[in-house]
Every structure is written in C-alpha cells, then in structure tokens.
Amino acid sequence: MKGDRHEGPVDRLSRRTGETLAWLFLVSAALTGWEVVSASLFRAPTIWVHDLTTMLCVACFLFGGAYAQVRREHIRITAIYDLLPARLQRACDVFGLLLALGYLLVLAWFTGSQAVESIRLGEMSGHAWNTPMPVVIRLCFFLATVLLALQVFVHLREAIRALRETLRP
C-alpha cells in the first residue's frame, strides 16, 4: 500500500516483479566482474557472460516500466500541468492514460506476434554461446508490455473515478 491507496493484484504483481528482478542487476554486475577477472588475470575469457548479462539487464529494464508506473515515478513534465485546476488535471490524467493504454495495446500485439514467431523458429543468438536470447528478450518485451498495460488500465480506472469526483457538485 502506498499512502492510503489500496494495492490490488496488478499493483502487487508489478511491485513484486520489479523488486525481485532488480536483484538481477546485482547478478549482472557480479558476472561482469567475474568476466573482467577471468579475462584479465587468468587469461580465460568466457563466451557466456555477455549474452547472459544482456538478457538479465533487458528483462530488468523492460519490467521496470510497470514497477515505475505502480510507484507513480515515471518522468513527467509538469510545468503546465501544475498550473491547471484539479478538474483539468484529472482530465489530462485520463487523456494521457488513454493514449498510453492505446499505444501499449498495439505494442503488445506487435511484440506478442514477434515473440510467437521467434519461439516458432527457435531463434538463437548466433553468438559463440548460441543462446535463445532473441526468444527470451522478445518474450520479456511482450510480457512486460502486457503488465505495463494492465498497470496503466488500473491507473486509468482510478483517474476516471477521480475525474468523476471533481465533476460532482
């Protein structure tokens, strides 16, 4: 719960996913450190660290969008917004969230079709370790987009409710 706002299932999922995946940045840093030591001191570079850290960091960044949204910490430019009356601010919130939701639904459709195609082809990275990195990244992109769209939908419902309250006499 943040403030007096009750967290629903989508909020909890976004928060837990973000908090859990954030640890993968630490894992990525440790793996990169291992790679530096392995290559520099032991003259035994790995073939797998680069691909693995790329996949881990991509997953973290992608799912970080829903985490930032649930915390309401996305970057905003509010110079004009802050000057508006509460009713107009609520209307702007609804409009912006509608635009974001429309964009995310199109993005989810597009990334979902790419993920399905990548899985169907059994797409591999083509690097020395030859991992299914394209499949993992495309699947993460789709799932993170769906989660972010769900989070935006939750906030849209809240914004509509807030707008209705400002319209009451």
Image (spheres, rainbow, N blue to C red):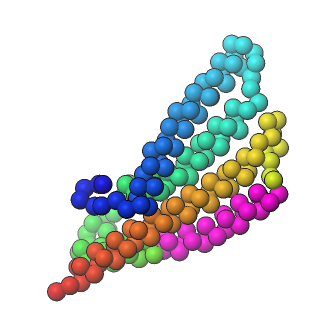
In the rendered image, residue 14 lying in the magenta stretch gets the answer no
In the rendered image, residue 74, in percent from the top left (x then y), is placed at: 41, 56
Whether residue 92 is visible to the viewer of this picture, yes or no, is no
In the foreground, 112 or 169: 112
Q: Is 122 in front, or is 61?
A: 122
Vertical comparison of 51 with 169: above or below: above
Which of 44/96 is in front? 44
Q: Residue at x 56, y 52 (%)?
A: 62
Asked whether residue 86 appears in the rendered view, the answer is yes
Q: Residue furthest front?
A: 9
Q: Is residue 162 left or right of residue 138?
A: left
Q: Residue at x 28, y 61 (%)?
A: 5
Magenta highlight on residue 106 = yes
Residue 53 location, quadrant: top right
Assign the C terminus to one quadrant of the image: bottom left
Instruction: Decide if residue 155 is on the left or right side of residue 40.
Output: left
- Residue 155 vertical position relative to residue 60 in the rendered view, above or below: below
Q: In which quarter of the image is the N terminus?
A: bottom left
What secondary structure prevails in the magenta region?
helix
Residue 27 in the image: state x and y as whole percent.
56, 32
Q: Magenta region: which residues? A: 99-121
Which residue is at a point 24% across and 84% down the rendered structure image? Answer: 167
Q: Indicate left or right for 113 with 166 as reference.
A: right
Query: Residue extending furthest top?
Result: 41
Residue 18 horizontal/vertical position (percent): 47, 48
**At x 72% / y 46%, what residue is drawn?**
133
Residue 26: image location, x then y, percent: 52, 33
